[in-house]
Image: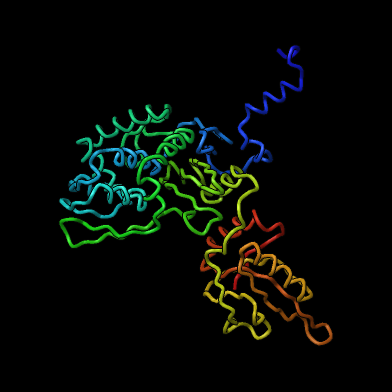
Amino acid sequence: MRNSWGGVWVVAVMTLLVPPTAFAIIGDPPRVTARAALVMDADSGSVIWEHNADVELPPASTTKVLTAILALESDALGRSFAASPEACQTAPSKVNLLPGQRLNLEDLVYAILLNSANDASVVIAESLSGSVPEFADRMNGRARQLGALHSHFMNPHGLTADGHYSTARDLATIFRHGLQVPKFRTILGTKAVTVSVENSARMIALHSHNRLLEGYRIPVIGKTGYTIPAKKCFVGAGTFDGREVIVAVLGSSDLWGDTKRLFEFGFGDVLPQAPLLQHAAMRPVVRRGAHPKRNVLRGMHSTGRKGHYSIQVGSFQRIDGAKRLQHALGRRGYDAAIDRIAKGAGKHKRTEYRVQVGAYPNRDQAESAVRNMATHVDMPVRIVQR
């Protein structure tokens, strides 16, 4: 065939066979700490990038994605169910249901996808199938129907159990199906909601554990998971400019860093600029109680929130250089302040202008912000105590 078609035709046919998104993401593979990870095009199901995608690993609470799908696909959404004593004794995390308390099935799904409530997961399992083992059988059958052939579930919540495992490919496959299930997107796209216990005056406040739902470049819906054996896990989807990418991460020690890098690789260079850092303020104020030789220039976007750490991005001998960097950071979505530092004495006295971002209450949050900045700021940065 090569001799009859000729080289040009072979290249043309190969071009037609390669997904068009592949050309947008050619480059260095993403760096991840995860034991396994996968990036998938949600529309076609084609894999953009993978790492140990078929290795069977504990999925922790990403298990609840399949539990939610089974609940949402059932004919019981209009019904409410009571929590059994066994469900209430399930280990945390949970919403602390008491025996006999009744919740609408849809509200139970909100509880498992937002608060990762293990007790609510058992209520769903017992209510829909009679027992946890019978519901697990149902989970395994549905997983096989969806093409998730290397997963086996022993419970509806993901707490560690022998024989309970999944893979990055299977989780992405299951999540891709979930995106087509009514109410699935709406629930995962909810930041916070309050649900009521039907036979009690109690109200339960639920909050999403997904840090990328807001404050990231693009909206990302998804489900987190964590146990000591599983480490940090996530499966979710990000959407931008009419395209959707699914990311699955298992066994990560830098969950949000890994997940962001995978989304950025999957979308290529088309994502919008980063939004304001979550912990940076926009009020032009002067820090009170500062060292007399150290002050923040008035009129700059200085950080007004209390915090013990900042990120120093650059140091300059001239104010115009500091202002240019501050302006460039502003265009990237970062709230930068300029600190004026008096150094030396007498004829050796000089002023140094330092550009800093954020005010963070602890070093962990500052380090997380540094990892986020690494994809946007191509210069050395360091964390400093305020």
**For this rendering, which residue is in front, 152 or 159?**
152
Answer with the quarter of the image where residue 318 lies: bottom right
Could you tell whether 69 is left or right of 316 in the image?
Answer: left
Q: On the picture, is 98 further left or further right than 18?
A: left
Color encoding of the figure: rainbow
The image shows residue 9 at horizontal and vertical percentages of 73, 21
Q: Is residue 268 visible?
A: yes
Does residue 38 show up?
Answer: no
Q: Does 272 appear above or below 266?
A: below
Q: 95 and 162: which one is in front?
A: 95
Q: Between residues 168 and 43, which one lies in front from this camera angle?
A: 43
Near-viewer residue (101 or 3): 3
Q: Which residue: 61% across, 65% down?
A: 334
Q: In the rendered image, which quarter contains the N terminus? A: top right
Q: Is residue 195 above or below residue 7?
A: below
Residue 310 pos. (x, y %): 60, 68
Q: Position of residue 113 (x, y in %)?
A: 36, 48
Q: Taking 21 as reference, is 323 left or right?
A: right
